[in-house]
Image: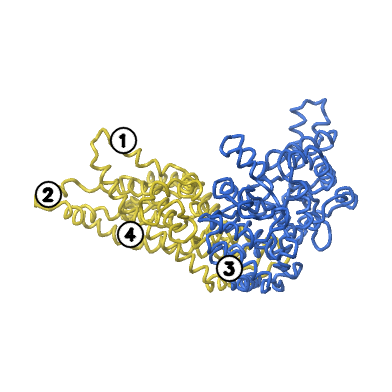
Amino acid sequence: MSTVVNPNAPGTEPGSLAPAPVKGRRSARTGLSDRAKSERKLGWMLAGPAFILMLLVTMYPILQALWDSLFSFRLTDPGNKEFVFLGNYATVLSDALFWKDLGVTVLITVVTVVVELVLGFALALVMNNAIRNTRGLLRTAILVPYGIITVVSAFAWFYAFDITTGYINNWFSWLPGIGPDFNWFASQWPALFVIMASEIWKTTPFISLLLLSGLAQVPSEFTEAAKVDGATWWQRMSRVVIPNMKAAIMVAVVFRALDAFRIFDNIFIMTQGQYGTETLSLLAYRTSIGRLEIGLGSAISVILFICVLLIAFVAIRVFKVDLAGSGKGR
Amino acid sequence: MSLGAVGALILTGCGDADAGDTPTLTWYINPDAGGQAEIAQQCSEASDSRYNIETALLPLDAAGQREQLARRLAAGDRSMDIMSLDPPFIPELAEPGFLADVPDEVEESTTQDVLAGPLEGAKWNGELVTVPFWANTQLLWYRESVAEAAGLDMDQPVTWDQIMDAAREQDKYLGVQGTQAESMTVWVNGLIESGGGSIVENPEAPADEVSIGMDSEAARKAAEIVGTIGRDGLGGPGLPTSTENTTMIEFQSDNGSFMVNWPFIYAATAAAVEDGTVDQSVYEDIGWALWPRVDEDEPSAPPLGGINIGVGATSENQDLAWEAVECIVSPENQANYFVTNGNPAASEAAYEDPAVREAFPMYETIRESLDQAAPRPQTPYYNEVSSAIQQEWTPPASVTEDTPRNTAEFIEAVLKGDQLL
């Protein structure tokens, strides 16, 4: 996933060319100069190959999956490949397992993103207000979990909570219900708790970094003026700071939601989806890679893809309104 | 391939034409303690430069091995010369013709003294499609102190009911694998076969005609055993996530009593004693017997495992590959592999080897168990059958007398394509 965001323009839609419309408007009025034309040409020549390559490596598998999803096709039974049109989608959408897995996926997405947003904001405030010479150290410390490979952190969390090798049961035995005999991965809710906790631990730094850049965008005159007017800390936060960094918050939410919706590694390592912890990407994996049912598995992947597109679409819509709003405000 | 040969020629110098011409055979192996790599080297050397075997490592778990092999074979990978295959997945690979036919002379030379259980697992549709290399079976391992305290005569066959009672009375844990994995199918299949039933009644039928034999007395008795162990906490709190490895660790602890597991645990416990993580007294306290009976009057049908060797239909060096297979599965190699890697031989002759008898004092029990053992359902849809069992029979505490019938309906719906798995 691309996680590169220009810290100077937190409201910029990722991947879009923010200054372009301004330039475009002016050139439409005045006509393009030769220099502007050649610059534009050079731009295309520089970015073109990468653009085409991206298109190839993303479009080819997507189209292949779309095509495969229309067939009843098992890799170890190639002789019986059969065109079933939307039959696979009917099977998937009419199956309770799919909806259960979708529910788990949505739950994980909502809970982790909300918790990460709150924690990330708190961490961003801490980083923003830290004394200058501790800032670098603090940022590095907060970013460490994000730098760890997900599979590695998943194993670390798994072994910490595992009933035979874990130490968590020992450390937290003073809590009611937790003791040496508590098996975290034997039922849905405790297992989901561990999965979400490790996910939150790992990706909160990402959100806090995005929010930090948003915080830095809020002009200090605003908060100072509010302070002079007698606003409390809470009022300054809710009336001045947060409304002025809405765009940064939205970027953080969209990125994390898209990422969280596709959660795979953590669950694959910790429970392999057993006991009600399976998400859509695990179901897609199990169907196409495990069962080698290429048709059915592709249909699930396509549905997952559509869900992700929907999230992105809705979020960016919300986003655009926001951008216009904050643009006027300035 | 030819580029590689040219490269090798240049590297080894122009005069050494032999080395450059030696075809390389790739052997896809399951992870072990290095025994297969050693055999590959020995056979390469013994071949007098006719071939050179290179090993390629497959994933650790059986399901992962199957995934990689099936995908490579389906894609027509020409490097699939020799493969170490887990028997339950053989029909799935044999049915579409991914495996090369075993030549008659190879069949004759490699299967003469193979034990009955492993030989059955090497066939599909009555034809030999792979060659047995080593054969695994589960034994009932027990702590002699616990069996004695429970007043059980372990020289006589014991039943599941007896060991469950013993664990309950002694307040110890039974070692069974209750996690949602292949080990669950191994356990359920062993219970049903021991009770005189079968999971799949017509293993060679096409997907929509497969009939699941789970609406039977044997399956209900199996469900009763699994459910009772789960609900009464006889397997301990770790049961819903216990694997072969975690049950071994539990067995070595003060909670250990009886455990069904593969023979690797004996060598692993010996190694743990050497490392100082397990006490010598625990090692000396370990006893073994045949897998427990379901019905006290009927011999049990212990789980069967192991590895067979197959040759890919797309391999470019099939003749040489079969020649290499003959070398790999020789009784001497099997005996040696048994001693060094702890994996029991499929060949009867290997059990006569003094080194085997010394390293594995339970060799007699293993051989007897292999003769009684029943394979898991041999069907091209094994993965579906097994995954469905794993989902329906876990956690063990949730298993009731309705579980077998629900499992049968679930498998049939999945095979007809009406339901996701």
Is mark 1 in CB contact (under 8 Å) with mark 3? no
| Residue that mark 2 sits on | A227
Marks 2 and 1 sit apart, C-alpha to C-alpha, by 28 Å
B9 displayed left or right of B177: right
Q: Amino acid at mark 2?
A: Lys
Residue A41 lies, with reference to residue A299, above or below; the image says: above
Q: Amino acid at mark 1?
A: Gly
Is mark 1 in CB contact (under 8 Å) with mark 4? no
- Residue B101 location (% of width, % of height): 83, 55
| Residue that mark 3 sits on | B420
| Residue count near mark 4 (Cα–Cα under 10 Å), binned few <14, some 14–19, many ≥20 | many
B108 displayed left or right of A21: right
Is mark 2 in CB contact (under 8 Å) with mark 3? no
Marks 4 and 2 sit apart, C-alpha to C-alpha, by 29 Å
- Mark before the other along the chain sequence, 1 or 4: 1
- Foreground: disc 1 or disc 3: 3
The answer as to whether the residues below labels 1 and 3 share one chain is: no
Q: Secondary structure at mark 4?
A: helix
The answer as to whether the residues below labels 2 and 1 share one chain is: yes
Marks 1 and 3 sit apart, C-alpha to C-alpha, by 50 Å
Q: Amino acid at mark 4?
A: Phe
Q: Secondary structure at mark 2?
A: helix
| Residue that mark 1 sits on | A136
- Residue B232 location (% of width, % of height): 53, 63
